[in-house]
Every structure is written in C-alpha cells, then in structure tokens.
C-alpha cells in the first residue's frame, strides 16, 4: 500500500522562479513507478518469479526499499550475483503482469493541465524503456523526452538522467521541477540543481531537509502555481 504523505501541500515549491514572483519553471519531469503509474503489484509478481526461478531468498520488501535505482545497482546492494539472468526473468515476468498496473487517480488530467499551461513534460525513470513506454502511452500525454537506463551517464541517485533530460529540452536546471517518490529521486534532483516535489501517494518517504510534499496528483497543480481544472479532459485531448 502507498505510504501516507508526511505533510500537506500547503505552499508552492521554494527556491524556484515561481516562488520568486518571476516566470515559473517551464519543465516538469516526473518519475514513473509510484508517481505516474502504480506498478507495485507488477513488481511484486515479477520478484516472486525471480525468487522461484533463481532460488533468491531476498523478500520483496527488501527489493522495494531500493526502488528508484537501476536494476543492476539494486542487485549489487542486495548482494545478488548473476544479475543479468535475474533481470531477464524479472523483465519477462513484469511484462506478463503489466495488466496489473494502474494509473494513479487524476494524474492524466494533471499532466494535461500542466501541458495546457505551456510547460514541457518529461519522464526520468529507472525502468527500461521497452517496459516504460507502453505504460506511459496509456496516459495519453505529450511527453517531450523520456530518459531511462542503458544510455549515457549513471542512474539515479546520480543527477545524470535528469540533466540529460534537460539537455534534450534545452532547459536550465533553474527552470525545471522533478517529481519523485523515493529518496534517490530527491537526491538526484538535489544534485542536478532542480526543484523537487515528493509524491506523497508513492512508495517511499522523503529525506531531510523535508521537500514540498503533494498529497495527491491534483496537489501538484497547487504547488506549481497552476489552476485546477473544473472538468476532466477528454481522453487524447492534446494529441
């Protein structure tokens, strides 16, 4: 079950142009798992397959604590060998169980509201793109860049994927905000020099100093200084 938020989304993000009274940040980058889509049931099913196929004794709860990092890094932190074989089993089981994933309530409307306000949207995830892109396509939102593992640079908590996404968009860190749900997301945002909002509906808790916390996807609009739409968007309204 997702953790309850630690604090109320009662003010805008600080340290950004929005907070200074000038032009608001123009780019919103988001994590995927635990922020856009609830994939926890998928991951639990896939990890069960890993334990069965490879005799792994590590419980899913230990794997869950490492979410947000590239899979190979998680294997190292869990002291598991034959990471390539384990990853293949995990990927196959995850793809087979992808039907269990559910978009978080209201997230698609929030993203479309942000895009309508003139912001660029991007995704920075540690999920391999072959499994990430079908999940993102279901949201029907205009993502300008999607950065995952396997390309240039290091994975989170290193700042590389966030910075590469900003390069894709031709945007400075001062003009961007990253939304994540794990401590590695918060650290990556800090090291990249971008504002950070913690998704309180996700799978992890923020680390100190406490960032702005959105209780729900719609609270993101308040923290970004954007208006909340009265009516939901029609599916594919911006496509």
Image (cartoon, rainbow, N blue to C red):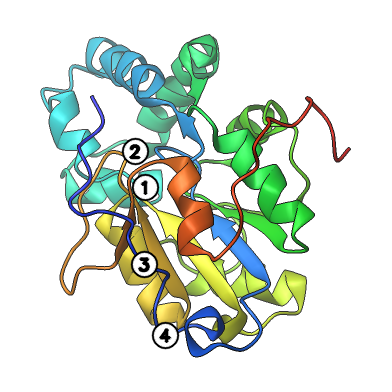
Query: Which label is found at residue 72?
Result: 1
Q: Report if the CB atoms under discs 2 and 1 are less than 8 Å apart.
A: yes
- Is 162 rendered above or below residue 43? below
Mark 4 surroundings: few (<14), some (14-19) or many (≥20) residues within 10 A: few
Are circles 2 and 4 on residues that touch, CB within 8 Å?
no
Q: Which residue is mark 3?
A: 11
Q: CA distance from mark 1 to mark 4?
A: 34 Å
Closer to the N terminus: mark 3 or mark 2?
3
Mark 3 vs mark 4, CA separation in Å: 12 Å
In this view, the residue in front, 11 or 111, is 11
Q: For residue 61, what is the image quadrant?
A: top left
Please provide percent x and percent y for residue 166. Answer: 65, 73
What kind of element bears circle 2?
helix
Q: Secondary structure at mark 4?
A: loop
Cβ–Cβ under 8 Å for marks 1 and 4: no
Foreground tag (1 vs 4)? 4
Camera-nearest label, 2 or 1: 1
* Quarter that holds the C terminus: top right
Q: Secondary structure at mark 3?
A: loop
Residue 207 % position (x, y): 18, 64
Q: Which residue is mark 4?
A: 15
Q: Earlier in the sequence, mark 3 or mark 1?
A: 3
Nearer the N terminus, badge 1 or badge 4?
A: 4
The single residue placed furthest to the front in the displayed view is 230
Q: Please state, as top left, top right, bottom left or bottom right, where the N terminus lies in the image.
A: top left
The residue located at (78%, 63%) in the rendering is 118
Q: Which mark is residue 83?
A: 2
Q: What is the CA distance from the residue labelled 3 to the residue labelled 2?
A: 43 Å
């Amino acid at each position: 079950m997702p953790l309850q938020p630690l604090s109320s989304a009662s003010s805008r993000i600080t340290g950004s142009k929005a907070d200074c009274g000038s032009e608001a940040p123009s780019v919103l980058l988001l994590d995927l798992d635990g922020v856009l889509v609830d994939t926890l049931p998928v991951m639990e099913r896939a990890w069960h397959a890993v334990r069965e196929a490879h005799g792994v004794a590590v419980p899913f709860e230990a794997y869950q604590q490492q979410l947000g990092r590239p899979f190979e890094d998680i294997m190292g932190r869990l002291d598991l060998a034959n990471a390539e074989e384990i990853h293949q089993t995990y990927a196959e089981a995850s793809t087979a169980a992808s039907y269990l994933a559910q978009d978080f309530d209201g997230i698609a409307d929030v993203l479309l509201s942000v895009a309508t306000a003139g912001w660029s949207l991007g995704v920075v995830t540690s999920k391999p793109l072959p499994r990430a892109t079908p999940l993102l396509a279901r949201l029907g939102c205009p993502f300008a860049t999607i950065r995952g593992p396997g390309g240039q640079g290091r994975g989170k908590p290193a700042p590389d994927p966030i910075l590469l996404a900003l390069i894709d968009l031709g945007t400075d860190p001062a003009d961007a905000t990253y939304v994540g749900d794990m401590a590695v997301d918060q650290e990556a945002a800090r090291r990249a020099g971008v504002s950070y909002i913690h998704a309180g509906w996700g799978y992890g808790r923020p680390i100190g100093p406490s960032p702005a916390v959105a209780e729900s996807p719609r609270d993101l609009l308040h923290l970004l200084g954007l208006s909340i739409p009265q009516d939901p968007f029609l599916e594919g309204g911006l496509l």
